[in-house]
Image (cartoon, grey):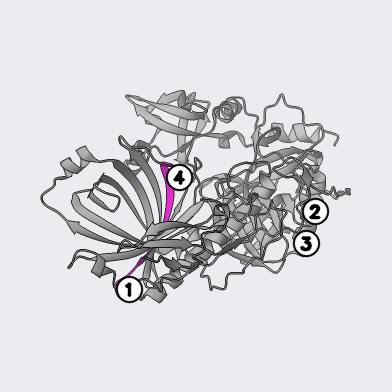
Amino acid sequence: MSPIIYGGSTDRSTNPSRVRGEVIENTEGEEVIVQLPIESTDPRSTRASTVLSPDTTRTTDTTRTTDTTRTTDTTRTRGRGRGTTTSTTSIRTRGTTRTRGGGRGGSRGRDVRSTVQLSPLTDVETDFSQYLPIGTNVEVECKFGLGRSTGFTTRVSTTILPVDQAALTETISRDYIWNQSTSRSIRSTGSRVYRKETRLFREYSVSPTTEDIDISRQFTAKVTAASEVDVTDVSAEQVISNATLIRDKTRYSAEYRGTVLSLTYVVTTRINTTGGNPNTTEIEVEALPGTGMDQFMAVVQEMADRLMEWQSAMNLYQLAMDPQSNRPTIYTPFRGTMPIAFRPSYSLEGYSVKHKMDGDRVNAVVLNGRVYFMTRADGLQFTDITTADTGQYVVDGEWIDAYVIEEDDSLTLLEDKHLIVFDMMYDSRVGSLLQTPYTDRYSRLEEWVNSTKLQGTELVLSPLMRPADVDIVDDTQSDGTVRSVWIRDDEVLYYTDGLILQLYDSPYVTGTDTRQYKWKEEDSITVDFRPRISGDKVELLVSTPLGEVAATTTPLDSIPTDYDLRSHIDRGTVCEFGYDKQSSRWLFHRLRTDKTSPNFITIAFDNMESAISAINTDEMLDLLHSLQT
């Protein structure tokens, strides 16, 4: 019997290492060769390759806050004068990056885009029900799986779905799966017990075209039809006792163009079986009743284009921040520099000073006229921010609320947040800037900010101050609380929560930088613990290479008795705690749902010691003003 060919040639004499596809069987037992035409350029590859530009209309949701404008009455108390921006003259250092092979090579001008074209399902019957039990509901879906065949995990933001983020519905479930064959299983979800039968119609897999392209098996796409039938002859207890898989799922979904799009974080527990990565991310396109195959495949292709766009941005981020890494690009985590807490015993000779903005920390990735945010909690996020600049950049900054100062001194919150940047790690005109002295990086950043306009937000340069020029301006709010602020051009106000102290000649350190310090006002030094209630006390856990351990304890009444809060703590949510010197205990401040793990033990102990021995604002200003630099 001749094989049915989808999207490729029947010639099997081709070098097997260059065949891009897999052999599967269709529903009638015929052999099917599935091939995926793909053109891709990895940023570290030295080979030229044709790159196909996706031609799809994307409806990209914003990651910005869209709150309505509100006014807050405040009275500002100004301190000893506002900080000024230093003017620095520097020699720009041409950056280079080291290739994986160990040689030195520039990274200027490389194309980091990846594209894929999925062949349509023209050779498959659209009436899937003929292959499945008569009278059952049939679901047609395409599932993109990430992390299935590697040892790495990645956090994929829901912004990869081209839907209104506010429309997403969250569903948390646990599935017990009793596999009876490769395509049939009995499942128990909550109180429901059902049989599921699945038929595979097309599998796409991304495979390398050259040795130095490492996108192999980073994700797959499977188009399937499935039926689910509730059963009464099997109990939930039987399924649980015979389960071969337990899948804990957190799913976010919304309807989109005749389909349901969803992103699911999956943790799999295997019972008496072996398999791949237990932590995976799944993106599903499920056809709604009445949706035609052409419309369904159009959404599948759009989702594939989004994944390729996401990977292209990840390619650039790894090239900028972790060029020596051996892991596939899509598994690169947030690599922004992390300062340690300042202590009075540290010398500040040769240091510059910046405001520590009270916003969301982001590494902004600029590629093909679009801006993406790499964050610690959610990985790479899509935004609706664009620019006419065709260069490739990676910059460090804060995504922060901005307030306009009205004539009566009240504050009006702007609808759009601002992107305040303070460092640059990559510029495609010269390559990597990680080893370039900070003053040179700042000069290049300043040049870029002055010449670049972003659509969708305002791009703002964080001022670089000499210690002698530093001042802290307070904003006393109507409820009596006092917060420090940076006022830009007497018009726009941003809240801050301390200072960043950085050597003028320092390189950019990915991860913890033990020579860069953060000073926070005495009552704002906090530690992110994972609290665990144990009797009448709360154990405060921190991260270590061997797991989480209790760093200290605090009385149970240090945490409010709010039911929702206690529920979060029972689920293991990370929480922020501050030290109260009067009672000598750690007090709950707020939930940190944006974090998946508590502070690492060295960072936690550093912050804990700083909180106990913190210096106040006046003492810090006196120390800075005494410096000669």
| Nearest to N terminus: mark 2 or mark 4 | 2
- How far is disc 4 from disc 1 in space, using C-alphas? 43 Å
| Nearest to N terminus: mark 1 or mark 3 | 1
- How far is disc 4 from disc 3 in space, using C-alphas? 35 Å
Question: Which amino acid type is shown beneath numbered disc 2?
Answer: Val
Segment tinted magenta in the rendering: 276-289
Using a 10 Å C-alpha cutoff, classify the residue at mark 2 as few (fewer than 14 neighbours), some (14 to 19) or many (20 or more). some
In magenta segment, residue 287: yes
Residue closer to the observer: 257 or 444: 257
Mark 4 near mark 3, Cβ–Cβ under 8 Å? no
Question: Which amino acid type is shown beneath numbered disc 4?
Answer: Thr
Question: Which amino acid type is shown beneath numbered disc 1?
Answer: Thr
Label 4, secondary structure: give it: loop
Residue at (73%, 36%) from the top-left corner?
621
Q: Position of residue 173 (x, y in %)?
A: 30, 48
Q: Position of residue 328 (x, y in %)?
A: 58, 46
Residue closer to the observer: 402 or 596: 596
Q: Is residue 404 left or right of residue 25?
A: right
Q: Nearer the viewer, mark 4 or mark 1?
A: 1
| Circle 2 residue | 430
Q: Nearer the viewer, mark 3 or mark 2?
A: 2
Label 2, secondary structure: give it: loop
**Quarter of the image where the N terminus is located:** bottom left
- How far is disc 2 from disc 1 in space, using C-alphas? 52 Å
- How far is disc 2 from disc 4 in space, using C-alphas? 38 Å
Q: Nearer the viewer, mark 2 or mark 4?
A: 2
| Circle 1 residue | 126
Label 1, secondary structure: give it: loop
| Circle 4 residue | 593
